[in-house]
Image (cartoon, rainbow, N blue to C red):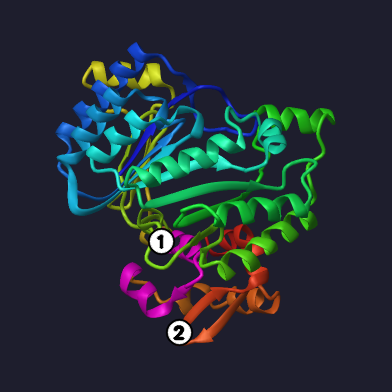
């Protein structure tokens, strides 16, 4: 299950996720609506991820209410993740989440470089990012992930390597490293188009990504998906469910669900989402039923992003389709380009070059 918390302190320059300014009264109304949906839900969840927005903008009491409602729907071994930002996390909130069963924090640090954080429009500095991670760890959260962004304008390869070195010195179990992307409609996109900023080219971003591929595994963080690295035993189970194309439920404005081969999306704006629930209407405003072949192709497109790659026997068992019959004409071309490899045992996986072009490979397979 994914729950979207659409509240933020401020909008980052690069963010295109739906969010609005935090208002405690509106947040109470929203949480009441989410809890109603949870009460009516008949599923038991093996992973829960609360994202946003900024979930840690909620008060300690609001977090206690939400985690209490979720607790009734969690499986015994559920992985329970909450995204937190350094500027909105405090000891009381950490305690509320820990008491509510949260066992994994995803910290939106983005960088440990104050100048880079300021350019990105983040509301915290490097000291606050370090303090948030250390405070959560000391309060008993042993499974902590950290998001980092590379490829920011005026960022050098040396700057990025300093971020990586700073991260591995902290009590982290997981690191996600993302290239900065310019999404349509964001302030960053307008800044780029006006010439106010010049983003690094593909070659510069490739060097930074390659630096992460080299550095993080040497310090105990195994590369297991295009943008994700983890210590042994701490792969993100929630994301693995996505990459295996398993079912998931999304609650909140704009959240997507994928159940029994049907993909749905909720009303995009909070006011519309609340109105529909208040009137006892379904929050879903769009849906599509995927054909068995489309489901199989999407499974391949997601799974190829993992370091483990696609096992043909696994693919047949999970989709009902023979991988070779579905993709026989495409694989030789991808191998010739050096993007995928077939190391034996019926497995197809990305090469190191392939990880640089993961989106291109996924598009070919879908």
Where is residue 122 drawn, in percent x and y? 61, 30
Write down the region rendered in magenta. Answer: 295-319
Q: Which residue is at 24% across, 21% downward? A: 32
Q: Which residue is at 31% across, 26% downward? A: 60
Against 69, residue 360 (above or below) is below
Q: Quadrant of residue 358?
A: bottom right
Against 156, residue 250 (above or below) is above
Q: Which residue is at 27% across, 52% downward? A: 260
Q: Earlier in the sequence, mark 1 or mark 2?
A: 1
Against 363, residue 95 (above or below) is above
**The residue tagged with tag 2: helix, strand or loop?**
loop
Q: Is residue 292 magenta?
A: no
Q: Which residue is mark 2?
A: 346
Q: Main secondary structure of the magenta part?
A: helix
- Label 1, residues with CA under 10 Å away: few <14, some 14-19, many ≥20: many
Which dot, 1 or 2, sits closer to the camera? 1
Q: Answer left or right for 196 relative to 86.
A: right
Q: Is residue 316 magenta?
A: yes
Kindly tell me whether residue 281 is visible in this rendering: no
Q: Quadrant of residue 215?
A: bottom right
Where is residue 342 drawn, in percent x and y? 55, 83
Kindly tell me whether residue 129 is visible in this rendering: yes
Q: Which residue is mark 1?
A: 235
Q: Nearer the viewer, residue 181 or 228?
A: 228
Where is residue 341 drawn, in percent x and y? 59, 79
- Spatial CA span between label 1 and label 2: 24 Å
Q: Answer left or right for 304 relative to 263.
A: right
């Amino acid at each position: 299950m994914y729950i979207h918390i659409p509240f933020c302190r401020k909008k980052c320059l690069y963010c295109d996720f739906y969010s609005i300014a935090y208002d405690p009264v509106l947040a109470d109304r929203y949480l009441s609506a989410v809890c109603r949906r949870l009460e009516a839900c008949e599923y038991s969840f093996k992973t829960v991820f609360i994202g946003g927005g900024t979930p840690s903008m909620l008060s300690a009491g609001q977090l206690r209410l939400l985690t209490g409602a979720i607790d009734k729907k969690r499986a015994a071994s559920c992985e329970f993740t909450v995204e937190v930002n350094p500027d909105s996390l405090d000891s009381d909130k950490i305690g509320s989440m820990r008491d509510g069963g949260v066992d994994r924090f995803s910290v939106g640090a983005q960088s440990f470089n104050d100048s880079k954080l300021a350019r990105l429009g983040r509301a915290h500095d490097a000291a606050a990012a370090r303090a948030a991670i250390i405070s959560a760890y000391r309060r008993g959260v042993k499974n902590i992930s950290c998001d980092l962004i590379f490829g920011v304008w005026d960022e050098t390869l040396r700057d990025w390597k300093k971020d990586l070195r700073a991260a591995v010195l902290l009590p982290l179990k997981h690191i996600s490293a993302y290239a900065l992307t310019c999404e349509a409609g964001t302030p960053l996109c307008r800044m780029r188009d006006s010439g106010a900023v010049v983003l690094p080219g593909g070659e510069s971003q490739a060097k930074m990504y390659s630096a992460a591929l080299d550095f993080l595994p040497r310090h105990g963080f195994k590369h297991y998906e295009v943008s994700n690295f983890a210590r042994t035993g701490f792969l993100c189970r929630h994301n693995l469910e996505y990459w295996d194309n398993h079912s998931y439920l999304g609650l909140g404005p704009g959240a997507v669900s994928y159940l029994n081969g049907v993909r749905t999306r909720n009303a995009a704006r909070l006011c519309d989402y609340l109105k529909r629930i208040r009137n006892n209407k379904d929050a879903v405003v769009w849906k599509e039923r995927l054909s068995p072949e489309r489901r199989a192709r999407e499974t391949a497109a997601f799974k190829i992003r993992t370091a483990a790659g696609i096992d043909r026997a696994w693919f047949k068992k999970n989709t009902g389709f023979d991988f070779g019959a579905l993709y026989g004409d495409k694989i030789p071309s991808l191998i010739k380009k050096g993007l995928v490899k077939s190391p034996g045992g019926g497995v197809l996986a990305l090469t190191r070059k392939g990880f640089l072009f993961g989106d291109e490979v996924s598009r070919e397979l879908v």
